[in-house]
Image: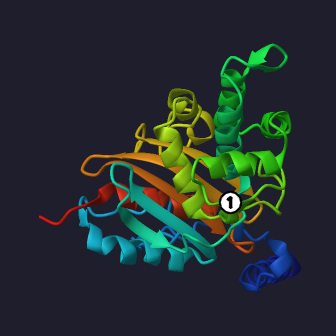
Amino acid sequence: MLKKQQFISWLSLLTLTTCLSPVRAQDIEPTVTNYNYNQDFISIPIEIIPPENKPYSSPSPSSCSSFIAPSIEEIIKRYGGSWGILVQKLSDGETIYNYNADRGFIPASNMKILTTAAALQRLSPSTTISANKSLKEWVTVTNLRSDNYYADTLLKRIGGGAIAKQTLAELGINPQGFYFADGSGLSRRNSATPRVLVDTLRVMYSNPQRDIFFASLPTAGISGTLRNRMKQTPVQGIVHAKTGTLTGVRALSGYLDHRQYGTLVFSILANHPNQSGAALVRAIDEIVLTLNTTGNCQ
C-alpha cells in the first residue's frame, strides 16, 4: 500500500514538472501571418505632390500678351529639347510669339500641310486621284487621318518635290524655308520652319480652296488625330490643326479661334530625341492652352 502511494506521488510530481517545463519552438506552429500588425496604429494622411508633368497645366484665366513669352518658355524649359514656334494674328499678321521661327526642324506629318496646299493649287478639287476618289476626298484623308500613302501619292501626282516647292513659292512661301524628301513627312530628311508653315496656313485661309483645306484639318477633342487631345478643355472645338508624329518629334500647326484676337495662326515644332512622345504632346497642348488665355492688358 505504501509503495502504491509512493508511486502515485512520484507520478504527480513528474506531471507537474512536465507542465512547467519550457515549450520548444517546434511544439507550436507560429501564427505571425495571422496577426494584424497595423491594428494598433492610427492612419496619418500624407500629402502626395503630383508629378511635374501632369496632363495639362492650368494657365491663369487671362494673361496679358506681355506674359506669353515667359509662360511658354517655362514650358519649353520644363520639357527640354529644340523648339520652333510662331504665333500670329490672321487678320493683320501681328506676331504674338516667335521662338526660332526661321530655323528648320523635322516637321513630321506637318509636311502634309505643304503637300495638300500644293496639290490644291495644281489640281482641280474634282480631279480623280485613285480608286475613284476625288482630290477633295484625298486631301481630307491625308490631313484628317494623317495617311502617309495618300500624302506621298499626292506629291507624286503633282510632279514631285521640286514642283511642289515651285507651286508654294508662287504663293509667296519662302522656298528656302522647307525641303521635300517625301510628301508625308515620314522621312527625317524633310525640313520646314515654323514661318513656312504659318505662311502656308495664312495663304490657304484666303485661297479659293480654303473650305476644302480647312475642313481637312483635325479639330481638338472632336475629330481626326486630335479627337483625343485637349478634350474637355477651353480649346476643345476651337483648334483646327495638323498633328505631326515621329520618334523624338511632335508638331502641331493650324488655327486657334481666339476670343479676343480672332483667329490665330500657329506652328509648334518640337524635336527632342531623348524625351517621350507623350511628354512632348503634353507640352504642345499646354502651349496651346496658354495661347488661348492670352489677351490685351486692361
Can residue 282 be seen in the rendering of this structure?
Answer: no
- Quadrant in which the N terminus appears: bottom right
What colour scheme has been applied to the protein in the rendered image?
Answer: rainbow
Quarter of the image holding residue 32? bottom right
Q: Is residue 194 above or below residue 186?
A: below
225 w.r.t. 101: above or below:
above
Q: Is 276 positioned to the left or the right of 5 in the image?
A: left
Q: Position of residue 77 (x, y in %)?
A: 52, 80
Q: Residue at x 45, y 77 (%)?
A: 73
The image shows residue 156 at horizontal and vertical percentages of 86, 38
Q: Is residue 172 above or below residue 117?
A: below
Q: Is residue 211 left or right of residue 175?
A: left
Residue toward you, 220 or 193: 193
Residue sitting nearer the eye, 144 or 32: 144
Locate residue 205, reporting x and y percent. Answer: 47, 39
Q: Is residue 67 left or right of residue 171?
A: left
Q: Give SS at disc 1.
A: helix
Q: Quarter of the image holding residue 130?
A: top right
Q: Residues within 10 Å of mark 1 (few under 14, many from 20)?
A: some
The image quarter containing residue 15 is: bottom right
Q: Which amino acid type corresponds to the residue marked 1 in the rendered image?
A: Pro
Residue at numbered disc 1? 175
